[in-house]
Amino acid sequence: MIDFLVIGGGIAGLSAGARLSYHGRVTVLEAEDALGYHASGRSAALFEENYGPPSVVALNRASAAFMRAENGGYLTPRDLMLVGRKDQAEIFERDVHDLNMQVIQTAQALARVPILNPDTLGFAALSSGAFDIDTDRLLQDFARTIRGNGGDVVTKARVTAIRKDGRWVVEAGEVFEARILINAAGPWVDEIAVMAGIAPIGIIPKRRSMARLPAPGGHDLSGWPMMLGAGETWYAKPDAGKLLVSPCEADPVPPQDAYADDMVLAEGLARYEEMVTEPVTRVEVNWAGLRSFAPDGTLVLGPDPSDPSFVWSAGQGGYGFQTSPAASQLVADLTTGATSELDPEITAALSPKRLRR
């Protein structure tokens, strides 16, 4: 019998499975043909310690050492630049405070990103504590850890039924039996919970669209920072010689294989174009991913109060990769009864218990 059966082969499931594989036999079930197919495969892949609500920031900081050093490290420097129009002073100042950024002169911003429009750029700030994450290698290393510790990672294993008979019995093409069930199914976590006879927690999947553009003006983008519009109304991130631009929408949708909304994407590209001198003449490809949020906007980690053998690793929102080392360790600690190194207030803020009151 399996000790820990993980439903979901994205970053939440693979990282939790890797941590738990040191404590027993792990099997991860992924419904799609490949790992990280949905949100994990469509991430902006940025590590910024100060991005997110307080509990997320605590997880970011607890993850930093792993991200920098484990397996040679997963981070490459990529500054983050906040830019605002001249009429966005209040929003800009709030973002600077929340992200703990350093205000810079607009001339400095123009020197870093020569396509910024001096006629519309009113404010700029910079964080040198942001990094690109090698997300594919991180996913594969977690999967490698599971397999190296005697576990299994199974794709094309869509869960169709779950029952509890002294142990968990899960049907997913074949039948799997386990002592403990880890629910890391992203937008589908509430559906998995209902199958298992556990009350849902109110996860809300929200779409975020993305477009990949040719390098604006033929510039070399390798040294450019990621740009974030004040109020998080758009972002633009260099990626392999191209520019990824997102409208930063968070539109609630049912769990699905998401696709970009053409109108929303066009509006986001227009907000980006307002701040630059190079027009968008061609979109090479577009896509969307679903980010899953609990009602209070932070992660849900740990055993369900009604049945401690049912464990949540859910609600990663846009923070899944950057929090994964610490979030997965917390899931493993809470599942096995170990003492977490995180502050008890943070642990409580992440617990499913907060959503059962």
Image (spheres, rainbow, N blue to C red):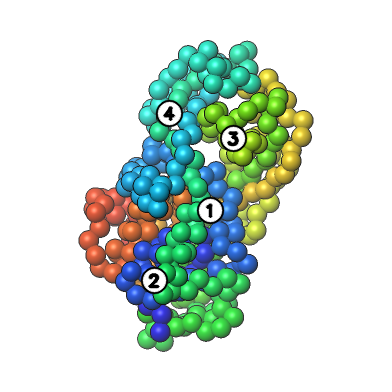
- Going from N to C along the chain, the mark reached first, 4 or 2, is 4
- Going from N to C along the chain, the mark reached first, 2 or 3, is 2
| Mark 2 vs 3: CB contact within 8 A | no
- The vertical placement of 179 against 269, above or below, is below
Left or right: where 293 falls relative to 336 = right
Q: Amino acid at mark 4?
A: Ser
Query: Which residue bears the numbered disc 3?
Result: 238
- Going from N to C along the chain, the mark reached first, 2 or 1, is 1
| Mark 4 vs 1: CB contact within 8 A | no
Q: Residues within 10 Å of mark 4 (few under 14, many from 20)?
A: many
- Going from N to C along the chain, the mark reached first, 1 or 3, is 1
Give the label, 3 or 4, closer to the camera. Answer: 3
Query: Which residue bears the numbered disc 4?
Result: 127
Q: Spatial distance from mark 4 to mark 2, Cα to Cα?
A: 39 Å
Q: Residue at x 41, y 75 (%)?
A: 150
Q: Amino acid at mark 2?
A: Asn
Element assignment for label 2: loop
Residue 82, can we see it? yes
